[in-house]
Image (spheres, grey):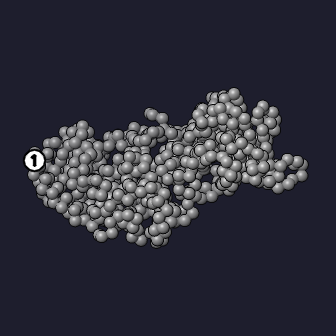
Amino acid sequence: MTDEVLIPKVGVVTDVRRDTPDVKTFRVVGTDGKKLFEHMPGQCAMVSIPGVGESMFSITSSPTNEDYMEFSIKKCGCVTEVIHSIEAGQQITVRGPYGRNFPVEGAFKGKDLLFIAGGIGLAPLRSVINYVRHFRKNYGKVIVVYGARSADDLVDIDEIKNEWSNEENFEVYLTIDRPQEGWNGHVGFVPSYVKEIGLDPNMTAVLCGPPIMIKFTLQGLLELGFNKTNVYTTLELRMKCGVGKCGRCNVGSKYVCKDGPVFRMDEIDELPDEY
Amino acid sequence: MLKIKVQDLNKLFDAISEKEPLYMPLEKAGEANYGLYKTGEKTALDVLKTVKSAKDLFFPQSETIVKFKTEGKNITVEDIREEVKPFVLFGVKACDFKAFEVLDKVFLADPVDTYYQAKRNACTVVTFACRRPEESCFCKVFGIDAANPVGDVTIWKDDENLYWRENTEKGSKLTESVRYLFAEGGEKDVQNQQEETRKIIEKLPFSSLDLSYFENTEMMDIFNRPEWQKLSEACLACGTCTFVCPTCQCFDIREFKASNDQIIRYRCWDSCMYSDFTQMSHGNNRTTQMQRYRQRFMHKLVYYPENNGGLFSCVGCGRCVNKCPQKLNIVKVVKTLGGKKDD
């Protein structure tokens, strides 16, 4: 019988890492111990605990990681609530990869890259940032601006501090919303921080985070002289099938699951404001 | 062309169903719907519109897609797909048949939906030309000829005979198996009937509906029309329009525990008219009924055509015209936003 996309593969959670009070990162392999499938940065997968439900998550790990996939998942609904309760050794189901990835082998090549993330918005960006680190010579300067509500809400902070900060031609700017004991870094919201840093508007920018952050950060970037055709983001809508058939993530003539989740800002401008 | 006396039709149905499962309009509880024919069943071939369309046969209202067994921390995936045995779908009107083309472009697009494909391939479709379309019909607007549908076999019926024309290889096979029940002839009768039917179609109130506005206007201009508010105000969000619609294809995927260790995951029809259709834990991108109502019609008249070479996701069957409890329907939308207002 031919393959059916709606039938998932079984994956094994081999490691659960608590990133923040409401974010955990799950490491997943197939039952044979190998990576379940290949993907590109920005693509998503349907993760499920049978009996509870299926939800779409961005694949947090870089495709250059040959051993496993990782999903950073925020506890915020019925499915994620249960996912957060699982321990290493638990089997889950996964199907994918779905959607259009960041153009890491296209428009991003040779460019200076600016990544701006808020909260759990780092999850899809971690995949592309680590991909860029792996093929470092293919890209120019990299700047990461990452903000969260508090220092405790910064996802993957160990990797950011210990690995990203040591890269050459690679700048990391962290900020938290309110002052906090033990934090001597920047305090303030991402959109205003972005304007303070002094960014080159010729960089290619990637934004990911809560809609309100995207809205104001984009405004700031446009004021700085960025062009919408060089600014990328990801959309997130409810999905069931993941392949443009169930109708849920339809906006205009696009389906976010297959035509997205990665969109350029000028492409988003052409969509009805229902995302 | 072949013909068979109407009083011999039950022999025909029996003969087909002896060979392959036969699905056709049957009367149950006073309503006509497609169902599995068994000898003695009350058929409803003469009913112009079944309540639900024929899409059920390829895209059932509810269907299991996969099963899981759990044991401790382990999961086994059970592929429940089976080979679909050949079956006959009998009596499909031109509008419902055109709807299969609309559905094909969704379900057979890459990656193919194998559940739909298996049923579609296994089916021999016998279409049934309309003799007397009624005032809620407007298939003509979508370029459909109700008097001459295609499919594997086409049938026409008058008070004396049923006329039979095979169109495809599948149709020939079916014909062969029941050929002994038929006599030759009927071309002239069919031709006369077609002429009569086309005359009726010309006079139908919605036949002059004009879709050119939707073909020639920018998406955002249509989307931003202020009339959507008024058009949608009476909508109850009952979803009847989507359930009776032959082209609506939105579905949900759900699951339940069938026993302690077995989980059944199934898909079922869903409706973009429902408030939880786009509900996520972090919010909802369509919070008002106006937005949901607009989405349905924008999809049928603008988004779907844009993705499918101008093909509309409406076939003018008129079921929503008859069934909407608030008398809201696609005809009203077309007329209000750009159709002819003189009818």
Where is residue B316? Give x, y as percent: 32, 58
Q: Quadrant of the C terminus of chain A?
A: bottom right
Q: Determine if residue A60 is in view.
A: no
In the picture, measured across the screen, residue B32 lies left or right of residue A2, that is left
- Counting the numbered discs, the total is 1
Q: Which amino acid lies under the numbered mark 1 shown in the image of this protein? A: Gly
Q: Residue at x 56, y 52 (%)?
A: A269
Label 1 marks which chain's residue? B
As helix, strand or loop, the secondary structure at mark 1 comes to loop
Q: Residue at x 81, y 38 (%)?
A: A161
Q: Determine if residue B80 is in view.
A: yes
In the picture, measured across the screen, residue A250 lies left or right of residue A13, that is left
| Residue under numbered circle 1 | B185
Where is residue A252? Give x, y as percent: 49, 53
Taking the view exactly as shown, the residue that stands out farthest to the right is: A182
Vertical comparison of B335 with B148: above or below: below
Where is residue A233? Give x, y as percent: 63, 46
Image quarter of residue B324: bottom left
Q: Quadrant of the N terminus of chain A?
A: top left
Dot 1 alpha-carbon crowd within 10 angstroms: few under 14, some 14 to 19, many 20 or more: some
Q: Residue at x 40, y 47 (%)?
A: B308
Image quarter of residue B29: bottom left
State the residue in front, B289 or B183.
B289
Taking the view exactly as shown, the residue that stands out farthest to the front is: A225
In the picture, measured across the screen, residue A206 lies left or right of residue B143, that is right
Q: Residue at x 61, y 55 (%)?
A: B280
Vertical comparison of A134 with A261: above or below: above
Where is residue B71? Give x, y as percent: 63, 40
